[in-house]
Amino acid sequence: MKIYNMQSDNGQPVANQFVCEHKGVTVFRSYAMVIAEKENGTTTLDPKWNCSNATTKYLCRFLGEGLKKKDIEKGIATGAYKVKNLNN
């Protein structure tokens, strides 16, 4: 399992924003909460993905360069992103 901090705009590790990679699944965590996961070309978001500005900022980075909150909302509406509880 590989776990690393997301990087700030100046390249420094950001506390409490993590990416975890294990057996083909890549997970974005903010604090102890799983926000999103990528597996086999499918991206799934937790319903509470938009819990803070910082979490949304780093979620956008996790999903792809240049994405904004409105792009995530559009992706959910069009079915590009699945939504389900990732924190059972």
Image (cartoon, grey):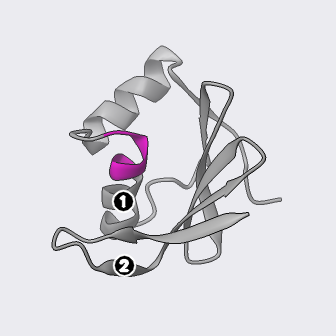
Question: In the picture, residue 51 is in which quadrant?
Answer: bottom left
Residue placed furthest toward the top? 78
State how many labels appear. 2
Identity, as a three-letter code, of the amino acid under mark 1: Tyr
Foreground pick, 10 / 72:
10
Q: Quadrant of the C terminus?
A: bottom right
Magenta range: 60-64
* Magenta run includes residue 76: no
Residue placed furthest toward the left? 10
Residue under pointer 2: 14
Question: Which numbered disc flags the more N-terminal residue, 1 or 2?
Answer: 2
Residue 11 percent coordinates (x, y): 23, 72
Q: Label 2: few (<14), some or many (≥20) within 10 Å?
A: some
At numbered mark 1, what does the secondary structure look like: helix, strand or loop?
A: helix
Q: Residue at x 42, y 41 (%)?
A: 63
Asked if labels 2 and 1 touch by Cβ distance under 8 angstroms, the answer is yes
On the rendered structure, is 71 left or right of 84?
left
Foreground pick, 81 / 40:
40
On the rendered structure, is 41 left or right of 6?
right
Residue under pointer 1: 58
Spatial separation of the CA atoms under disc 1 and disc 2: 9 Å
